[in-house]
Image (spheres, helix red, strand yellow):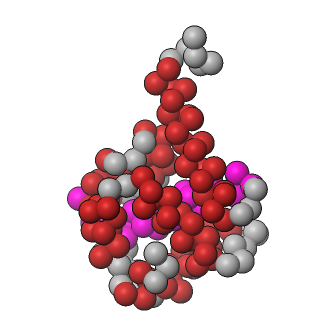
Amino acid sequence: MSALGLKIIDSAVETANAWINEVDTRTGWDHKQRAYRLLRQVLHVVRDHLSVDEAAQLGAQMPVLIRGIYYEGWNPSKTPVTVRGADDFIALVQAAFETDPLGDAPEAIRAVIAVLDDHISKGEMEDVKQTFTTKIRTLF
């Protein structure tokens, strides 16, 4: 018997924790709550930059709870938000860390992108990356 009574829910929680743990390991933080905030914020910044169709295509490849985090608070009528420079992208991610600055923000962002690269198809990630300027792709 599963802990919550539904194997599908237990599996979804386990998968979400695995993604958060991967971010935590790649950043070297040993702080799951912070890794969750980073994952959430990078997902939102990426999502908000994409066209509605591209955002949906990326979201379709995510596990159910990560997909919920990704879509949380999304207002498709206000997207895409054009981000031109790496500093702008970093500032949008840093917004979730005002009282707890990231330190090496580019490296933290790369940690999340690496997790996405590990779990999202190569073609989809290439489509996502190509929507960003060359300057922002240096973060990827």
Asked where in the image residue 93 lies, by quadrant, the reply is: bottom right
Where is the N terminus found, in terms of image quarters? top right
Q: Which residues are magenta?
A: 31-53
* 84 drawn magenta: no
Instruction: Tell me which corner region of the image, top left, top right, bottom left or bottom right, holds residue 81.
Output: bottom left
Residue at 75 percent of width and 69 percent of height: 100
> In x, y percent, where is residue 136?
44, 83
Instruction: Answer above or below: position of 27 versus 90.
Output: above
Q: Is residue 57 visible?
A: yes
Q: Is residue 40 magenta?
A: yes
Q: Is residue 36 above or below residue 7?
A: below
Q: Residue 131 sits in which quadrant?
A: bottom left
The residue depicted at 59 percent of the width and 53 percent of the height is 22
Residue 138 vs residue 2: left or right? Answer: left
- Using the rendered image of the protein, determine whether residue 80 is visible from the camera's viewpoint: no
Q: Is residue 89 above or below residue 122?
A: below
At which x and y percent is residue 66?
48, 46
Question: Which residue occupies the foreground of this view, 74 or 30?
Answer: 30
